[in-house]
Amino acid sequence: MAQTFYTNGNIIDVVNEKIFSGSILTEDGRILEVGEDLVCPPGTKVVDFKGGYVSPGLFNCHTHICLDCGATSTIGGRDAAVTIMALENCRRLIEGGVTFIRDVGGKDYIDLDVRDAANAGKIDAPQMQAAGKLLCMTGGHGWQSGRECDSPDECRKAAREQIREGVDLVKIMATGGVMSGGDQPGATQLTEEEMRPAIQAAHNAGLKTATHAQGMEGIKNALRAGIDSVEHGFFLDDWCFDFMKQHGVFLDPTLSAMYWIKVKGTAAGIPDWAVKKVENTIDAHTASVAAAYKAGVKIALGTDAGTPFNNFEKTAYEMVLMEGAGMDAWTVLRSGTITAAQLCGVEKTHGTIEPGKTASFTVYGGNPLENIQAVMDCRMTVIKDKIYTHD
């Protein structure tokens, strides 16, 4: 049994909304004790937080580790090259303080193999859940690496194929998107009737589902079909909010994806048609997030990392954008910790710093409750007692 005593930290309690100076005693990747007056057992390894602000490990609930963050968000290339890139993206996630990800669409099941290696501790990577091949209509958003399906029966079979491969969730495409030429974010793609059997197949297997859904009609189709989380959610109304609260559906807004396309623009090589889509929808997207927050919808942190200039090490910037959209700092911190853990179904083992939970922490140089920008200064990442320090 290997114990570690973490000391000299400002512990962030995201549930009770307080910060206290204290220590954490762990054993083999699990938290044993947390408190202000803990005594280090003799012979125990000591890790000094150096006065940093210690948060539960940061989640990113919407990543694409097989994408390259380039101007056109490429997923092509040989499997070996994509795998090498995915491993580098995992390293960058750790650099940004991320300890757990939900990867929502990979290439040729590379994401599943990386997940298995990550969760076994064989590589430097956050703990992971992975969706395998996303489900889309023929020629729909994400078709290049997804599983095309065009009827209720095909969609059911496609979901079952992903389950057979060992996915953790099933990802379904309800609308068009920003980075696919020839469609619009508001255009419906897979229908309610097509999504329902795929969602039912996932639920029958004990898995959750997520939908890429930007336009309102597609969002409502997915909600009525039984989806568990809405990814992006550009256009939402009170009906959506009421339904999501009643049925426990999460919103994973990925504000970062739109932000970096707007900031970098065509000057960085992003296609003009993609930039125009962002310009036409970004204000509505931000307004939808603000309204969802005010309505009491559960909002989890995801960035769509892998899309243009949406770098994996910048995950925490999503919190800055969330606060900019009107969310209070405590809710923002919960979005990337306990709320994200609830979305992923791992809240019993992750998301807070308390006995029995996984020993995964993100240590910031400053207090994010005083200045949310402090989340961009990650000094240390701990994943199941494996320590990564950042200069």
Image (cartoon, rainbow, N blue to C red):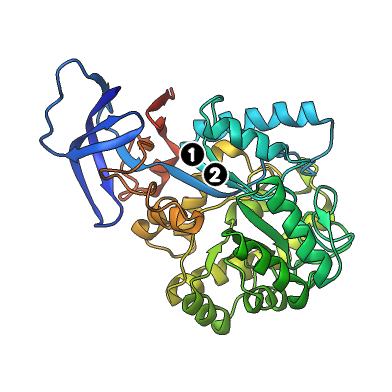
Q: Which residue corresponds to the image point at 29% horizontal and 33% vertical from the top-left?
A: 52
**Could you say which is closer to the camera, residue 371 or residue 25?**
25
Mark pair 1, 2: CA separation: 7 Å
Within 10 Å of disc 1 (Cα), the crowding (few <14, some 14-19, many 20+) is many
Which quadrant, please, contains the C terminus? Answer: top left
Residue 346 lies left or right of residue 31; in this view the side is right
125 shown above or below 309 = above
Is residue 378 something one can see in this rendering? yes
Residue 309: percent from the left, percent from the top? 68, 41
Q: Which residue corresponds to the image point at 52% horizontal and 51% vertical from the top-left?
A: 318
Q: Quadrant of residue 180?
A: bottom right
62 shown above or below 251 = above
Callout in the foreground (1, 2): 2
Residue 389: percent from the left, percent from the top? 41, 23
Which residue corresponds to mark 1? Answer: 98
Residue 298: percent from the left, percent from the top? 46, 66
Q: Secondary structure at mark 2?
A: strand
Amino acid bearing label 2: Ile
Residue 386 lies left or right of residue 263; in this view the side is left
Which residue corresponds to mark 2? Answer: 101
